[in-house]
Image (cartoon, coloured by chain):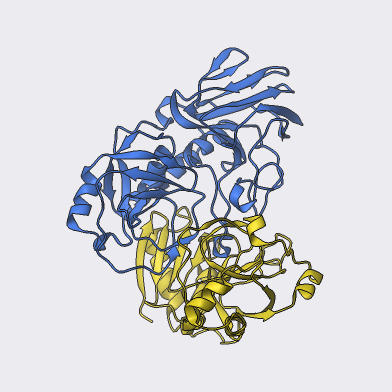
Chain colours: A yellow, B blue
């Protein structure tokens, strides 16, 4: 880890900690974010973590840029990575089916696997949540098996239904609410991912691990899932 | 309790406040008044919390029927507002009486007007803010992300106090004649030399593709020579350059992280001015470094927190 601190706006500093996407960075990013939140305290307006960076938005009426840089140095001195098991683990039930996951066949065709092999491969791994972004509660997870890596759709869909489970390159995600999107949709989860009633609002948080558990249509419906075909909702 | 009912509205008339904070790590956008400075002066005129909920009226097409005698404040764009048939200039507070109609018509100068009421408009804040973000279904009168619509009722509960007058010299200049301050940073060093020259010497024309997420600019193509980026946090006012080389200034409802290279970010004052520009207008940029921009921003914030 080699730290670079850059001013990116009048009241924002970008901390660059790594140069590549790697699960091994997560315990460091989580530990750094915790220390920074504690040290900045009330002067912190927002801390936006991503794969390799932490962006700090602070209150210029409480601290100036020089003080913020000092706090960053203090926060990161002798930093130890967070416990490997500090994030939560989730098992998200997913109904993998062409009706709600029209790109299952595309991924099968690209990889030379059968649809059931694609499902088995996608659900075999516990993915790490790298970052939240794009929409409230939208968790970028990875890394997906290289055999399933596929580019985004040429033309994004104007409406991807809530709960859609999708892949792009070596990342996977679930859509917390209906939104435009260009990822390859392979299934749907009935679980609410972003809900004002949830503690912390978002079910998934950076550093969490997510395992997709295939379920049959009946179980998906029993859990409250909506089996309306994607095309009908798009 | 005072009330006013909405008789006419558009999707661009929304409750806004200072923004939604402390939740951006969850992918929740910042939101808030696009011209934050005019919003704060509107609240200042009534002695409100400076970030209290106001109505952001973009372009006009908004009409209110006042149901109780009260006092309101108006700042930002001149949208040729009328109270009954009496013209109402912005940057002042004014008395309203039950039965009067407040109309916002078409822009004369600027595009976003801010209407404040004593104590702020009532609403149930979602994730700590009244800011309306339709694509996230957050904020607004009912907390569901909807803009104001005909039939809605605006309520405010604070008593009308002696409104303030804003000294002429504090009224922000909305004109675009002076260049906008752009704080250098991010991936600036990986753009071509020609791009850096063009960035600060060309006239940039506002594209019609402009909303609360961002404003596209048209001008010379800015060539980026660096590697592809891994998505990272995006500050308010960031100037990002997608592969077509045409910059986009990112506003309040931008996505929280993104992977396009950036040349820097507009200062808060520059952003407030840009938020009042309309498609077809031209802007220029002037480089500024962080500590200078910070000093000016702090001065501006302190002026707002001092009674006249």
Q: Position of residue B107 (x, y in %)?
A: 47, 25
Give the vertical position of B25 relative to B52 (above or below). below
Pick out the residue farthest to the right.
Answer: A222
Q: Position of residue B291 (x, y in %)?
A: 32, 54
Between A122 and A77, the residue placed more toward the observer is: A122
Give the vertical position of A204 relative to B193 (above or below). below
Q: Quadrant of residue A13?
A: bottom left
Give the side of residue B68 with respect to residue A27, left or right. Answer: right
Residue displayed at 47% across by 52% down: A61
Between A209 and B200, the residue placed more toward the observer is: A209
Pick out the residue farthest to the top.
Answer: B85
Between A132 and A181, the residue placed more toward the observer is: A181
Between B253 and B266, the residue placed more toward the observer is: B253
Q: Is residue A35 visible?
A: no
Q: Quadrant of residue B278?
A: top left
Give the side of residue A209 with respect to residue B152, left or right. Answer: left
Q: How many marks?
A: 0
Give the side of residue A216 with respect to residue A87, left or right. Answer: right
Q: Quadrant of the N terminus of chain A?
A: bottom left
Residue displayed at 60% across by 86% down: A124
Q: Is residue A181 visible?
A: yes
Q: Quadrant of residue B3?
A: top right
Q: Position of residue A80 (x, y in %)?
A: 49, 85
Residue displayed at 26% across by 49% down: B287
Q: Position of residue B193 (x, y in %)?
A: 18, 57
């Amino acid at each position: 880890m080699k730290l670079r601190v850059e001013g990116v706006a009048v009241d924002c500093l970008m901390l660059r900690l790594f140069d590549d996407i790697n699960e091994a960075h997560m315990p460091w990013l989580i530990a750094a974010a915790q220390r920074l939140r504690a040290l900045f305290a009330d002067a912190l307006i927002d801390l936006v973590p991503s794969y390799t960076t932490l962006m700090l938005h602070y209150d210029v009426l409480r601290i100036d840029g020089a003080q913020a840089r000092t706090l960053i140095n203090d926060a990161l001195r002798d930093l130890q990575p967070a416990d490997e098991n500090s994030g939560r683990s989730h098992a998200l039930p997913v109904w993998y089916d062409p009706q709600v996951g029209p790109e299952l066949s595309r991924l099968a065709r690209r990889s030379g696997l059968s649809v059931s092999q694609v499902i088995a491969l996608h659900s075999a791994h516990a993915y790490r949540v790298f970052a939240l972004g794009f929409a409230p509660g939208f968790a970028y997870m990875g890394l997906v098996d290289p055999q399933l890596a596929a580019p985004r759709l040429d033309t994004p869909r104007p409406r991807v239904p809530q709960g859609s489970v999708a892949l792009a390159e070596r990342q996977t995600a679930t859509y917390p609410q209906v939104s435009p999107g260009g990822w390859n949709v392979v299934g749907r989860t009935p679980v609410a991912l972003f809900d004002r009633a949830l503690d912390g609002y978002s079910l998934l948080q950076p550093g969490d691990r997510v395992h997709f558990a295939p379920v049959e249509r009946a179980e998906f419906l029993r859990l409250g899932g909506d089996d309306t075909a994607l095309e009908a909702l798009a | 309790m005072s009330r006013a009912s909405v008789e006419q509205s558009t999707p661009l008339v929304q409750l806004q406040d200072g923004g939604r904070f402390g939740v951006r790590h969850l992918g929740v956008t910042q939101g808030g008044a696009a011209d934050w400075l005019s919003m704060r002066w509107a609240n200042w005129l009534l002695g409100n919390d400076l970030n209290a909920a106001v109505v952001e009226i973009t372009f006009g097409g908004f009409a209110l029927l006042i149901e109780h005698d009260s006092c309101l404040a108006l700042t930002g764009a001149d949208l040729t507002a009328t109270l009954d048939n009496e013209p109402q200039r912005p940057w002042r507070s004014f008395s309203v009486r039950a039965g009067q109609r407040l109309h916002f018509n078409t822009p004369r100068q600027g595009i976003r007007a801010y209407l404040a009421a004593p104590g702020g408009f009532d609403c149930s804040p979602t994730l700590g803010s009244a800011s309306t973000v339709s694509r996230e279904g957050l904020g607004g009168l009912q907390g569901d992300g909807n803009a104001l619509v005909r039939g809605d009722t605006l309520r405010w509960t604070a008593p009308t106090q002696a409104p303030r007058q804003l000294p002429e010299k504090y009224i922000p200049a909305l004109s675009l004649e002076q260049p906008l301050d752009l704080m250098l940073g991010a991936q600036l060093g990986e753009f071509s030399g020609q791009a850096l020259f063009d960035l600060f010497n060309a006239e940039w024309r506002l594209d019609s593709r402009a909303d609360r997420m961002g404003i596209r600019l048209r001008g010379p193509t800015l060539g980026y020579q660096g590697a592809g980026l891994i998505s990272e946090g995006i500050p308010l006012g960031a100037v990002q350059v997608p592969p077509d080389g045409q910059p986009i200034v990112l506003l309040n409802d931008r996505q929280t992280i993104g992977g396009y290279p950036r040349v820097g970010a507009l200062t808060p004052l520059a952003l407030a001015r840009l938020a009042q520009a309309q498609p077809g207008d031209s802007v220029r940029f002037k480089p500024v470094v962080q500590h200078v921009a910070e000093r000016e921003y702090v001065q501006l914030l302190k002026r707002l927190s001092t009674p006249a």
